[in-house]
Image (spheres, rainbow, N blue to C red):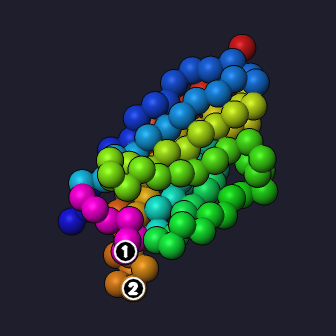
Amino acid sequence: QVQLVESGGGLVQPGGSLRLSCAASGRIFSFYTMGWYRQAPGKQRELVAAMTNGGSTNYADSVKGRFTISRDVAKNTVYLQMNSLAPEDTAVYYCNAAHVGLGSNYWGQGTQVTVSS
């Protein structure tokens, strides 16, 4: 069982920055693809950014050039640096861990990001 705990959400003005953190319960990065998803009110959950166990990354077109996913293996933590935030980035952001072979999937509890003036 993998436990994921997100932090770092909050209220920020348009153009501002936030860094989200997702602390995992153990050394899982070698076996899991880590992802950040978001869900806005009335919309489906969507992938924002992901990092494979090998370190490859991919991003939603809407966040390319503004968001960066990274990880600290020693701290068992994955981050999402979000710059140039816009109101349309407002959502609950979720951390996800997907096992590369077994198909098991784990979610964090989510953290609210609100971009508003």
- Residue of label 1: 31
Q: Is residue 95 left or right of residue 63?
A: left
Viewer-side residue, 11 vs 42: 11
Q: Secondary structure at mark 2?
A: loop
Residue at x-position 73% and y-position 36%: 88
Q: Quick check: 60 above or below 101?
A: above
Residue at x-position 64% and y-position 47%: 68
Residue at x-position 47% and y-position 52%: 71
- Residue of label 2: 101
Q: Quick check: 47 above or below 66?
A: below
Are there few (<14), some (14-19), or many (20+) residues within 10 Å of tag 2? few
Q: Which mark is residue 54?
A: none
Q: Pointer 2 and pointer 1: residues touching (CB < 8 Å)? A: yes
For the residue marked with disc 2, what is the amino acid?
A: Gly
Residue at x-position 71% and y-position 58%: 60
Q: Which picture quadrant has residue 41? A: top right
Q: Is residue 59 left or right of residue 52?
A: right
For the residue marked with disc 1, what is the amino acid?
A: Phe
Q: CA distance from mark 2 to mark 1?
A: 8 Å
The segment highlighted magenta reads 26-32
**Mark closer to the chain start, 2 or 1:** 1
Q: Can residue 69 be seen at all in this image of the molecule?
A: yes
Outermost residue, top direction? 117
